[in-house]
Amino acid sequence: MVSVSVKCPHCGKSLMSAGKKLDGAKAIEVNLTYAGKHAPLYLSALYGSYLAETELPVPSGKVAGFRCPHCKADLKSTRKCDACGSQMVAFDLKDGGQVQICSRRGCKKHVLEFQDADSELQAFYKSYLKALK
Ligand SMILES: [Zn+2]
Ligand SMILES: [Zn+2]
C-alpha cells in the first residue's frame, strides 16, 4: 500500500494530521460540514483504503461539505463523480497532481491524477490497475 501526502489546493498548508493515525499512517484531516454542524474528519492516507473517522453522523447517501482546517476554503472540485453525479472534493498531492474523492457518503469513488508521469505513485497505480484485471 502506498500512502499519499496531501495539502490544501487553496492555502498550500498540509492536510496531514499531526497526531491522528489511521491504518498505521498519518491521517488526512479536514473539516466536515453537514446540516449546519461541523467536526474534524480523518481519512486514511493509504491509497485504496476507505477508512474514515468522524463524530459527525452523515447519513449514507447524503452529500457533506469538506473544508480546509487552516483557511476554511471549500475543497469542492469542479469535477462531478462518474458514479453518482455528486460534486468531487479535491486535495493537492505534495509531489504534484491531485487526489479527488466523492463527497457523497457511501460512494467509493476515488480519482488520482498525476502531473509527473514518472512518479512512483503513477507506477504504483498502473500496477494496481493491472492487478485488478
Ligand atoms: Zn487551506
Ligand atoms: Zn459518487
Image (cartoon, grey):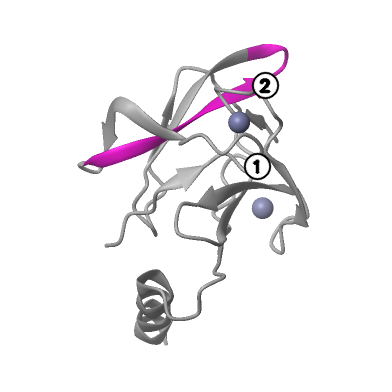
From the viewer's perspective, tell me whether residue 95 is left or right of residue 31: left
- Report helix, strand or loop for mark 1: loop
> Cβ(mark 1) to ligand 2 < 8 Å?
yes
What predominant SS class does the magenta segment belong to?
A: strand
Amino acid carrying label 1: it is: Ser
Query: For residue 112, which quarter of the picture?
Result: bottom right
From the viewer's perspective, tell me whether residue 70 is left or right of residue 62: left
Q: Residue at x 50, y 80 (%)?
A: 117
Q: Is residue 112 above or below residue 88?
A: below
Amino acid carrying label 2: it is: Tyr
Residue 33 location (% of width, % of height) = 65, 22
Residue on which disc 1 sits: 103
Pointer 1 or 2: first along the chain: 2
Q: Residue at x 36, y 29 (%)?
A: 17
Q: Are marks 1 and 2 in contact (CB under 8 Å)?
A: no
Residue 24 location (% of width, % of height) = 20, 42
Residue 101 is one of the magenta-drawn residues: no
Q: Which residues are magenta?
A: 25-37
Q: Residue at x 34, y 83 (%)?
A: 131
Residue 32 is one of the magenta-drawn residues: yes
Query: For residue 118, which quarter of the picture?
Result: bottom left
What distance separates the C-alpha of mark 1 from that of mark 2?
11 Å
Which disc number belongs to residue 34?
A: 2
Q: Nearer the viewer, residue 31 or 115?
A: 115
Q: Quadrant of the N terminus?
A: bottom left
Q: Nearer the viewer, residue 96 or 25?
A: 96
> Where does ligand 1 appear, by image quarter?
top right
